Image (cartoon, rainbow, N blue to C red):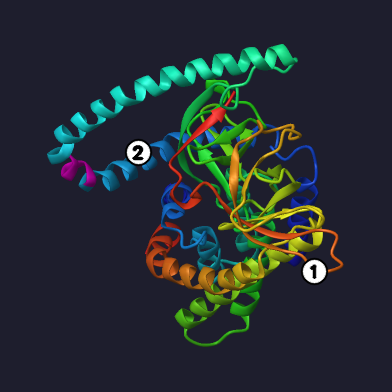
Amino acid sequence: MRPAIYILLAAVVQTVLLPRLNIFGVMPDLFLVTVIILALQKNRTAVTLSSAGLGLLTDLLSAGFFSNTIAYVIAGNIAKTIKEDFFGDEKSLAVRLVLGLSAGLVLLTGAGHFFLLRREWSLSYLSFRLVAFPLYNLLAWLIIAPLAQQAFYGD
Amino acid sequence: MKPLAAAIVIAALILSFSAYRDLFGLRHALNSAVYPFQFLAASTYKGVVGLPAGITNLFSLSRENELLKQRVKNDEAKLNQLAELILENNRLRAALGYQAAGRYGRRLLPAGVLGRAPQVWSSVIVIDRGANAGIKENMAVVAAEGLVGRVVEVAAFSAKVMLITDVDSKVAAVSGRSRDLGMVEGFSPLKLAMRYVSSAGDIQVGDLIVTAASSSLFPPGIPVGRVLKAEKQEHDLFYQIEIEPAVPFSRLEEVFLVF
């Protein structure tokens, strides 16, 4: 039950509260941060399926393409692959994954819009987003990591 | 299990471009299920944020009430004059064979903004009116300042509105001054781009851009924004135009649906 409550709370916070705390349209992505937290402890199948589930949830709460499903599955698998070959402090790995994958998500989805859908974005805004989004996600990770730990692992 | 990831990615790509994007009603069901929690959270947030202002306002309410009563009295005379002008305008338009017009010529239904869709590159808001209020897809949405966007998805009690700042949004618009026609597209959450305006036209910084009569989705004459930058090189076919939206989207809490 606890994962379901966590996911519902995250969905409400993500859609209602965080948009009102945005900085020039940038807000943290709680579900991406959750995917990274899960990737550090679950096995690959569980990571893939839970990333897909969380991505599908956010896409169904949005409109249009299933871009989050694609992005979260890729991000979850990259995080898992890096985790499998990593020896060291898990917290520093989590920080690097949050920053790196957040920037990667901006680039991946931005590239998808540009190359697949032929949509143009402001370059200066893309640059701003590449810096602000990872930092905002890092702040979100600091806050929700203990809650996610409690919800999914019970400790 | 990388084949599993690849299969999910391919399935998501296929679904994105298919007619089954609502997953056989799952999208609407999920949005309807989440709506009560979103409504509660939005109401709580607005109540908490409005509380300090509400307390300080108590002390000035009486004076403000008197000022507003006086303003209403003054405006009543102007409104009567305006009503007469509208009637005369309609009579003259009818005499010339045009249809009667009013402000947008449509009924407006107010709606509260619950929140925003959780996608990185999309600008889609969620409002607290849905199919139960008669909302339909592609309805125009406006605010007091100007054009907000259009309804892209309707659930039972809520609906999603694509803002004009969304990268997928396109609005046929004209310059209020020179009547040059172009297409306004989302460029960033703070700016719009106006494309396909002929370089032979006359667009200047500060021009008000409004929706065009040729738009099939939006009533004509709704403010879209003001020109921030209008440049053209010697051999360009079109202007490079950036627009500041008329509506302050970061503070948007109430909108109106155009019936």
Query: For this rendering, which residue is in front, B232 or B177?
Result: B177
Q: Position of residue B254 (x, y in %)?
A: 44, 37
Mark seen at residue B52: none
Query: For this rendering, which residue is in front, B188 or B237?
Result: B237
In the image: residue B152, left or right of residue A18: right
Q: Secondary structure at mark 2?
A: helix
Quadrant containing the C terminus of chain B is top right
Q: Secondary structure at mark 1?
A: loop
> In the picture, residue B66 is in which quadrant?
top left
Residue at the image position 80 percent from the left and 42 percent from the top: B18
Find the residue positioned furthest to the left: B59
Gap in angstroms between the C-alphas marked 1 and 2:
50 Å
Q: Are marks 1 and 2 on the same chain?
A: yes
- In the rendered image, residue B66 lying in the magenta stretch gets the answer no
Residue that mark 1 sits on: B233
Principal secondary structure, stretch drawn in magenta = helix
Query: For this rendering, which residue is in front, B6 or B40?
Result: B40
Q: Position of residue A33 (x, y in %)?
A: 51, 65
Residue at the image position 22 percent from the left and 32 percent from the top: B67
Q: Is residue B106 above or below residue B42?
A: above
Q: Please state which of the two labelled residues, at mark 1 or mark 2, is closer to the viewer.
A: 1
How many numbered badges does the structure rendering display?
Answer: 2
Residue that mark 2 sits on: B43
Span shown in magenta: B53-57
- Sequence-wise, the earlier of marks 1 and 2 is 2
